[in-house]
Image: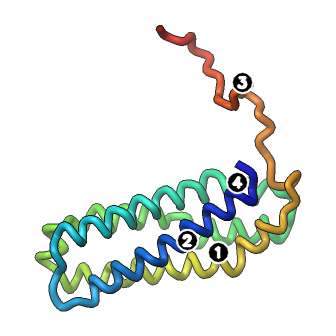
Amino acid sequence: MPMIREMQRLRAEHAALVTLSHILAGMVRAPRPPRATALLSARSLFRDTLLRHLKCEDWVLYPRLKASGDPELIRITREFELEMGDLAMDFTAYDDKWTIERAEAAWLDFCRETAIMLEILGTRIEREERDLYPLAEKLRPAQSVIDTGAGRGRTGHFRSSEPRRA
């Protein structure tokens, strides 16, 4: 995907995550848990959006930026990786810990941990929007393309060394 389209998609995901964060923050400010289905729906949508977004950044965007040849962009990308590299793992541990049943049973603890997690994620989004994404968007198209298609067929799919099965 061209870098400009990739950046548009990542920014749209940031906007969606901010909206979903506001929804979850509203839920955890309540003195009692909302309906289990409402909490489950909001958390599921947030989790799916966040993990897809982090995978794209960690597996596609950050490697492209580090291969750009731009010293400032390489430095800031590495800084982000060092500071926030475990965010997906940390979020998954939080999400696995807080089942709906456990969140309802220990509502105040769940609320406190959720607020902390949302703050961490909000900080990352703000920093990426302010510090990283503007630099990434300044890359010339030739700088942002590191995939030459080596190992791919004409369709762009990776060729397998194993024979196809019927």
x and y percentages locating residue 88 in the rendered image: 46, 62
Q: Is residue 66 left or right of residue 119?
A: right
Question: Residue 18 or 119: which is nearer the viewer?
Answer: 18
Disc 4 marks which amino acid? Answer: Pro
Which mark is first along the chain, 1 or 3?
A: 1
| Alpha-carbon span between mark 4 and mark 2 | 19 Å
Amino acid carrying mark 3 in the image: Gly
Inter-mark Cα distance, 1 to 2: 9 Å
N-terminal of the two: label 3 or label 4? 4
Residue annotated with mark 2: 14
Q: CA distance from mark 3 to mark 2?
A: 33 Å
Within 10 Å of disc 1 (Cα), the crowding (few <14, some 14-19, many 20+) is some
Query: Which labelled disc corresponds to residue 146?
Result: none
State the mark number for residue 128.
Answer: 1
Nearer to us of marks 3 and 1 is 3
Tag 2 secondary structure: helix
